[in-house]
Image: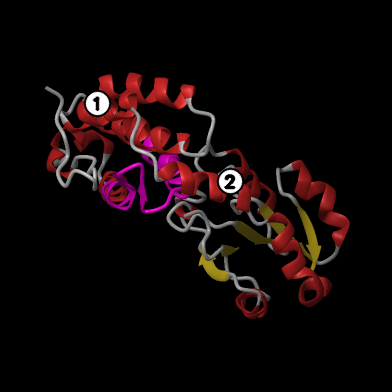
Amino acid sequence: MLNDPPVVGIAGAPAWAKRAGRLLRAGGYVPVTCAYAANWPLNLIDEYPALLLVDTTGPGWEARVAAVTTEQATRRIPVLIIAPDVAQEAAARQVGAVGALALADLDRALLDRARAHARRMDEATRAALACQCQEPLPPLARLGVQRFNAGAFYAQHDAFEEQWMAESGPARELYRAILQVGVAYYHITRGNHAGALKMLQRSVQWFAQLPDVCQGVDVRQLREDAERVRHVLQEMPPGEIASFDRSLFRPVRLVDEGEPGVEA
C-alpha cells in the first residue's frame, strides 16, 4: 500500500542527513538514502518515497530536482529542498519542488512539512479502495487477465483500458498497473527495450497504491514479477533484447481461483 509506513527519501549524503533521519523516525516516517547514481532519478522508484528531501548546498540541485519532477515515473514524488535559507523558495518551485525549508528550521519544522507534503492516501480513498478490493474482478478485467495469461499482451490492453475508463474509483489503478505490465511484455516480444523499460518503470507508481490482494488479483506476486523483469531488463544491453528469457513472464494469479485462467 502507498507509503505505509511512509518513506522519506534523503537525496545524496547531505551533512544534515543523520539529524533529519532521527527526526523522521521519531515522527513515524522511514528515512532512506537515495544515492545520486547514474540512473537518477529512476533509482528512486524501488523505494518510491512519499517525500524526497534535496540539499541545495552543492551544484546542480536544480537539474536534479527537475529530473524528478518531469520524469513520468517519478513526477508524483513531492520534493522539498533543504536550503541555507528560504531565499531559494522561488527557485525550488520553478523546478517543480513543493517548497524550501531553511536548514535552521529543520528541528522545528521538518515534521510539519513532511505531514503537509508527503504523498499519502487519504482515509476516504483508503476506505473506498479497501471496499472495492473486496469486490469480484469485473468481467472486462477478467477478460484482460485471461488474455494476459494466454500471452496476448497486445489484446489485453484493450480490455483493461476499457475497464479503467469505465471505473472512477481507486481500484481503477489495478487495471492500469496490469495493463502497463502487459504492454511492457509486448514491447519485449517486439524488441523494444526502451518502450518496455519505460512501461515497467511507470507501473511502479500504480502498484504502490494497491494492497497485496485486490479483487482476487495477487497484486504482490505480479508486482514482484514485474520488478524482476524490470531489473533484468535494466541490466541487459538493448541490443540483446531478443535473448530475453520470456519464462520470466509469469501469469496474473487469481487467489480466489488458485490457478491463473487462460482464455478459451
Q: Is label 2 in a helix, a strand or a loop?
A: helix
109 horizontally vs 135: left or right? right
How many tags in the picture? 2
Q: Is residue 164 above or below residue 96?
A: above
Q: Residues within 10 Å of mark 2 (few under 14, many from 20)?
A: few
Instruction: Answer whether residue 116 is magenta in the image.
Output: no
Left or right: 59 in relation to 264 = right
Mark closer to the chain start, 1 or 2: 2
SS for callout 1: helix
Identify the residue position indicated by label 1 in the image: 153
Q: Residue at x 47, y 22 (%)?
A: 166
Q: Residue at x 29, y 32 (%)?
A: 182
Decide which of 218, 23 is in the foreground and name it.
218
Q: Position of residue 185 (x, y in %)?
A: 26, 33
Considering depth in this image, is 194 or 199 the residue closer to the camera? 199
Residue name at image x 83 percent, y 74 percent: 104
Question: Residue 194, can we see it?
Answer: no
Reply above or below: 100 against 109: above
Instruction: Please provide the residue range marked out in magenta.
Output: 199-225
Q: Which label belongs to residue 125?
A: 2
The question of residue 208 being in magenta is answered with: yes
Could you say where residue 217 lies in the image, as x and y percent from the top left? Answer: 30, 43
Q: Quadrant of the C terminus?
A: top left
- On screen, 19 above or below 230? below
Q: CA distance from mark 1 to mark 2?
A: 30 Å
* Residue shown at the point (41%, 20%) measured from the top left: 162
* Percent x, y of residue 16: 68, 75
Disc 1 marks a residue whose amino acid type is Phe
Q: Which mark is residue 171?
A: none
Q: Residue 176 is drawn in which quadrant?
A: top left
Amino acid under disc 2 = Thr
